[in-house]
C-alpha cells in the first residue's frame, strides 16, 4: 500500500496575524514568529522518544547493527518517520460512502 502522507499542518497552530510568503508572521512591529514544526515532525519525535526510552529495544538494535552507531541512528530516525506517517494516515477522514 502506498501512502500519500501530508505533513499534517502545524503541530501547535495558533492565530495568524500577518503571514508572509516565507511562512513567518508579524505579530507586532518588531516581533515575528515562524510556523514551527509540522505535526509529522512532532509525531516522529514522540515515536523516537518512545523507542529511546526502552533499554531492551536499544540493546537489541545495538546488537542487530553490530555496534554501528551511524546505521543505528539512521534506522531509528527513518522508523520514527514511518510511525509518524502511519499515525497521519490513520487519522485521515473516512472516504465518503456511496449511497444509491
Image: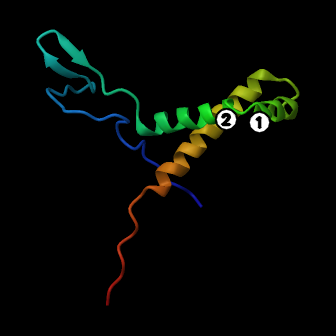
User: Residue placed at 76% from the left, 36% from the top?
Assistant: 57
Identify the image quadrant of residue 60: top right
Q: Is residue 58 left or right of residue 41?
A: right
Instruction: Identify the coloring.
Output: rainbow
Q: Position of residue 8 (x, y in %)?
A: 40, 44
Q: Quadrant of the N terminus?
A: bottom right
| Residue 93 shown left or right of residue 67 in the figure | left
* In the image, residue 85 above or below residue 47: below
Q: In the figure, 11 relative to 96: above or below?
A: above
Q: Quadrant of the C terminus?
A: bottom left
Query: Toward the viewer: 27 or 50?
Result: 50
- For disc 1, the marked residue is 57
The part of the image, by quadrant, that contains residue 53 is top right
Is residue 4 visible in the rendered structure shown here? Answer: no
Task: Classify 10 Å Cα crowding around label 2: few (below 14), some (14-19), many (20 and above).
Answer: some
Is 73 displayed left or right of 35 in the figure?
right
- Residue 36 seen by the camera: yes
Q: Which mark is residue 51?
A: 2
Secondary-structure class at tag 2: helix
What is the distance, in whole Å, between disc 1 and disc 2 at their CAs?
7 Å
Q: Nearer the viewer, residue 70 or 62?
A: 62
Residue 89 point in image, percent of width and height: 49, 54
Q: Give coordinates of residue 9: x percent, y percent.
A: 35, 40
Q: Residues within 10 Å of mark 1 (few under 14, many from 20)?
A: few
Q: Are marks 1 and 2 in contact (CB under 8 Å)?
A: yes
Dot placed on the residue nearer the N-terminal end, 1 or 2: 2
Amino acid at each position: 500500500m502506498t501512502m500519500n502522507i501530508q505533513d499534517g499542518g502545524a503541530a501547535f497552530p495558533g492565530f495568524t496575524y500577518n503571514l508572509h510568503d516565507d511562512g513567518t508572521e508579524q505579530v507586532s512591529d518588531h516581533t515575528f514568529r515562524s510556523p514551527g514544526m509540522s505535526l509529522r515532525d512532532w509525531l516522529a519525535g514522540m515515536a523516537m522518544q518512545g523507542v529511546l526510552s526502552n533499554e531492551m529495544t536499544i540493546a537489541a538494535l545495538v546488537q542487530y547493527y553490530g555496534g554501528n552507531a551511524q546505521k543505528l541512528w539512521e534506522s531509528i530516525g527513518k522508523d520514527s518517520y514511518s510511525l509518524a506517517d502511519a499515525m497521519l494516515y490513520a487519522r485521515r477522514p473516512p472516504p465518503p460512502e456511496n449511497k444509491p
